[in-house]
Amino acid sequence: MTFVSRSLLAASALVAFGAPAFAQTDVKIGYALAPDSHYGVAAAKLEEVVTAETGDDFAFKHFPSSGLGGEREVIEGLQLGTIEATIVSSGTLANFVPDTGVFDIPFLFRDLDHARAVLDGPIGEEILVKFDDVGMHGLAWGEQGFRHMTNNRNAVHTPEDVQGLKIRTMENPVHLAAFNDMGAAPTPMAWPEVISSLQQGVIDGQENPLSVIVSVKLDEVQKYLTLSGHVYSPAMLLVSKPFWDGLDDDQKAAFEKGATEAAAAMRGYVDDVETSGVETLKERGMEVNELSADEKAAFQASISSAYEGYYETYGKDKVDAIVNFE
Ligand code: PAF
């Protein structure tokens, strides 16, 4: 049998068994949280929209709950082209695009609307496009919400209450500087190690938004929740640059549309958990307190020298432009 007739035979066998007569492109999408988290909801929406727009061009393969490793490893996978897509926190992003760290400055944003307006506006866009220079393509800003502290040692009302507290932070120099300034004993750690470290008492606490605290059931390993809202936690939908460069214009438009809708779904999840999350966690047995305006001001005052460092790194003009953004 000639090569041509063998190929024809193979093609007709594919058609006969209903298999697609063209190769689908795999989209491995990795994220740190479960399918029923804000990340899972966003990843599902991305797949839904891209599939509706492009038919069978792409086969999405989801790797939730750090199935492809910690956020830093997944980002490196994107750069190498071994992983196509991810939804990540800003935890390690500043290690790849330093300017991203400006959004990790504590007490920068007034509320969710303020943060969303900045990220969706020119300042957010200016940073998003920088990912093209480091082997990735930023599709959209998503979010996790405002981060709060949890721990097993004591309720937190004032900076005195966190003195020496072994609190896990993301591998993020901006957060680390703030917790050092407060007098805590911050321990930067990749997310996949956090739950076991809390269980073993290696660390006393951690900080994350309600979206994470509720979906990961941190109440099972933490007693006190302090609604400190000390920092906003952006997220980002990213694809690998080699993957992005291989798409045609229609496919790119489909991913852009999918990412916009995914980010909206993520924000919708955050809105819901912001209203119901505290009750849920109280019912599950957590002891919850919310910082009063004065208590919050005391925390803000306690990180004044970290703020000097932020001004030096990012420029006071840039920080003020974000604070004053309407
Ligand atoms: O704390 C973190 O590292 C992040 O907020 C998490 C939980 C991995 C979600 O991106």
Image (tube, rainbow, N blue to C red):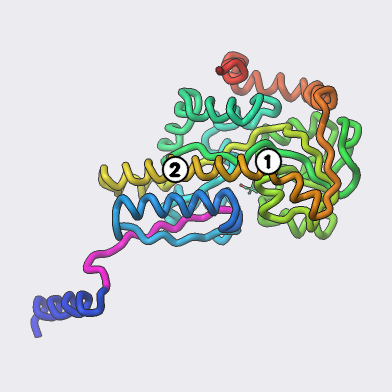
Find out if the beta carbon at label 1 lies less than 8 Å from the nearest ligand 1 atom. no
* Residue 309 horizontal/vertical position (percent): 69, 22
Find out if the beta carbon at label 2 lies less than 8 Å from the nearest ligand 1 atom. no
Provide the residue span drawn in magenta: 19-32
Whether 272 is among the magenta residues is no
Which one is nearer the viewer's eye here, 76 or 219?
A: 219
* Residue 263 horizontal/vertical position (percent): 49, 41
Which one is nearer the viewer's eye here, 282 or 217?
A: 282
The type of residue carrying mark 1 is Thr
* Residue 74 horizontal/vertical position (percent): 53, 52
**Badge 2 local density, few (<14 within 10 Å), some, or many (20+)?**
some
**Badge 1 local density, few (<14 within 10 Å), some, or many (20+)?**
few
Closer to viewer: mark 2 or mark 1: 1
The type of residue carrying mark 2 is Glu
Is the C terminus in the top left, top right, bottom left or bottom right quadrant? top right
Which residue corresponds to mark 2? Answer: 261
* Residue 127 horizontal/vertical position (percent): 48, 29
Whether 23 is among the magenta residues is yes
The mark that comes first in sequence, 2 or 1, is 2
* Residue found 80% across the figure and 56% down from its top: 221
Which residue corresponds to mark 1? Answer: 275
Q: Quadrant of residue 200?
A: bottom right
Identify the element where label 1 is drawn: helix
Residue 69 in view of the camera:
no
* Residue found 55% across the figure and 30% down from its top: 116
Q: In this view, does 174 lie above or below 87?
A: above
* Residue found 58% across the figure and 28% down from its top: 113
**Left or right of 174 in this view: 200:** right
- Check the image and name the residue furthest to the bottom: 1
**Left or right of 287 in this view: 68:** left
Count of marks placed on residues? 2
